[in-house]
């Protein structure tokens, strides 16, 4: 695996996988117990049913390993790879009962994260290098580390992880502080060198953020004409981010404005799940799906 590939800490998912399996299995997989002998071995193939960008293979593998510690996973592709429809992503050899028990948990994580990676790649491709695609904090509670990892797999860039690692003065902060200037002044006294980003919902807010010497100005829900006007006023004195109502159709026009970043909440809150399935057969069974050589 290339060192440039996104990294995911096992500590971010192992307990989530354990709890997801407990939620699904409960007191036991009653169907599998009744229909599959404990000694039965099986081979499963993870198959892409539509074109997608992979994310979450480590998590899916962990689900199979937690259900059967002796399972062996052979990958043909890696997270971040584009996968055409019909391709075998990975094969799992192990207890047939373990494969059946872990199937839904593994797929739930893999389909969700691959869906995010796939949507992100579409936005990155549409940006064509002219503007940086950022995610947001609009993530599924407790799954933020995984979903932001999926964004990286799709070629996007993570914005702040939470409220603790970056500054963003939003409209409510400014209102409660007595205005943008007052909020920035207070933040600068406490910021310890962190860049100060200010949300601007009007051109008047843009002027206030410029006057306060904000490091980054977030142009929120402005029209394309207002964005161009705002960028002219800012004139390179702050980095600029566009947000609000960002769609693939609008992205080429937004990228052409010259702003530095565009944040897209839909990457994590609206990405449809990717279509993958698990095909299980006898150990040694050859299935009809084609596979690609593993990329290195």
Image (cartoon, helix red, strand yellow):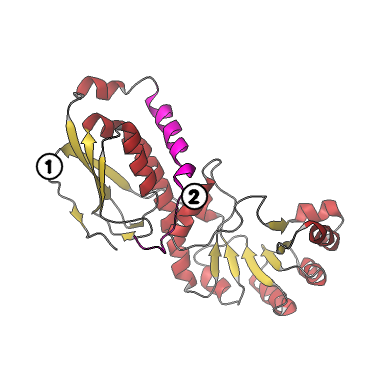
Against 266, is 10 above or below? above
Residue 97 lies, in percent from the top left, at 25, 29
Residue 146 lies, in percent from the top left, at 48, 48
What stretch of residues is rendered in magenta? Answer: 1-26
Quadrant in the picture for the C terminus: bottom left
Against 26, is 211 above or below? below
Marks counted in the figure total 2
Q: Nearer the viewer, residue 285 or 271?
A: 285
Residue 270 at least partly seen: no
Residue 180 at least partly seen: yes
Res 61 quadrant in image: top left
Q: Inspect the magenta stretch and tell me whether residue 12 lies in it.
A: yes
Residue drawn at x 45%, y 31% is 19
Residue 22 lies, in percent from the top left, at 42, 27
Q: Which residue is mark 2?
A: 147
Q: Secondary structure at mark 1?
A: loop
Q: Which mark is residue 109?
A: none
Q: Which residue is mark 1?
A: 285
Residue drawn at x 39%, y 31% is 21
Q: Secondary structure at mark 2?
A: helix
Q: Inspect the magenta stretch and tell me whether residue 23 lies in it.
A: yes
Q: Residues within 10 Å of mark 1 (few under 14, many from 20)?
A: few
Residue drawn at x 72%, y 68% is 215
């Amino acid at each position: 695996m290339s060192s440039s590939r996104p990294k995911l800490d096992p500590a971010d998912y192992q307990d989530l996988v354990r709890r997801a399996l407990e939620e699904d299995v409960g007191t036991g997989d009653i169907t599998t117990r009744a229909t599959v002998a404990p000694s039965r071995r099986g081979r499963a193939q993870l198959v892409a049913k539509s074109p997608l960008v992979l994310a979450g293979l480590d998590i899916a593998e962990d689900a199979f390993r937690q259900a059967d510690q002796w399972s062996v996973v052979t990958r043909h592709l890696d997270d971040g790879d584009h996968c055409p429809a019909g391709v075998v992503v990975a094969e799992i050899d192990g207890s047939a009962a373990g494969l059946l028990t872990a199937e839904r948990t593994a797929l739930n994580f893999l389909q969700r994260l691959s869906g995010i990676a796939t949507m992100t790649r579409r936005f990155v491709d549409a940006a064509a290098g002219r503007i940086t695609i950022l995610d947001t904090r609009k993530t599924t509670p407790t799954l933020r580390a995984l979903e932001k990892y999926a964004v990286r797999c799709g070629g996007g860039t993570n914005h702040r992880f939470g409220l603790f690692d970056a500054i963003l003065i939003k409209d409510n902060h400014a209102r409660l502080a007595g205005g943008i200037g007052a909020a920035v002044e207070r933040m600068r006294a406490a910021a310890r060198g962190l860049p100060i980003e200010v949300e601007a919902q009007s051109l008047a807010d843009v002027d206030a953020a410029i006057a306060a010497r904000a490091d980054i100005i977030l142009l929120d829900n402005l029209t394309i004409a207002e964005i161009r006007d705002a960028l002219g006023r800012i004139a390179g004195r702050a980095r600029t981010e566009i947000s609000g109502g960002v769609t693939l159709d609008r992205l080429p026009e937004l990228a052409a404005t010259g702003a530095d970043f565009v944040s897209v909440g839909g990457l994590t809150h609206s990405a449809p799940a990717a279509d993958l399935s698990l095909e299980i057969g006898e150990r040694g069974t050859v299935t009809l799906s084609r596979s690609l050589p593993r990329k290195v």
